[in-house]
Amino acid sequence: MLFDIDWQGAQQLQEKMGGDVVSIFILPPTMAELQSRLHRRAEDTEEVIATRLANSRSEIEHWLEYDYIVVNEDLDSAFASVQAIVEAERLRRDRRPGLF
């Protein structure tokens, strides 16, 4: 399963499921780029964008708590990185009991 959750949710999953959880933090390339992306979407008011940027700063502070970090400079590349992480984790020896 793949969840798109905040750091508190990720922390709760880690506490309840331990080694069964693989965490991936998706970072924007820069805060300026994040701001630019929010403006290009043209979905939110300036006030909402300012709030989202402030919230993102506090979220980003938790990136060190994750197993993997993917910098989303390009959506296709970031997606490929996430796919590679998932595949590698599925192939880990400790996740493949009963092979021999």
Image (cartoon, rainbow, N blue to C red):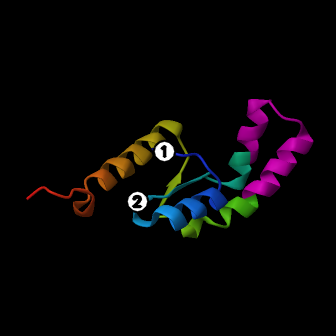
Residue placed at 78% from the left, 56% from the top? 55
Instruction: Name the quarter where the N terminus is drawn.
Output: top left
Quick check: 80 above or below 53? above
Q: Tell me the number on the disc at residue 2.
A: 1
Report the number of numbered marks.
2
Instruction: Name the quarter where the C terminus is drawn.
Output: bottom left
Secondary structure under tag 1 reads: loop
> Camera-side residue: 59 or 46?
59
Residue placed at 58% from the left, 46% from the top? 4
Residue placed at 79% from the left, 37% from the top? 39
Residue placed at 73% from the left, 55% from the top? 56
Q: Tell me the number on the disc at residue 20.
A: 2
Q: Position of residue 19 (x, y in %)?
A: 40, 65
Q: Which SS type dominates the magenta stretch?
A: helix
Position of 59 compared to 66: left or right?
right
User: Disc 1 residue type?
Assistant: Leu
Secondary structure under tag 2 reads: helix
Q: Position of residue 34 (x, y in %)?
A: 70, 47
Crowding at dot 1, Cα within 10 Å, few <14 / some 14-19 / many 20+, comes out as few
Quick check: 55 above or below 37? below
Mark 1 or mark 2, whichever is nearer to me: 2
> Camera-side residue: 79 or 89?
89
Q: Which residues are magenta?
A: 35-56
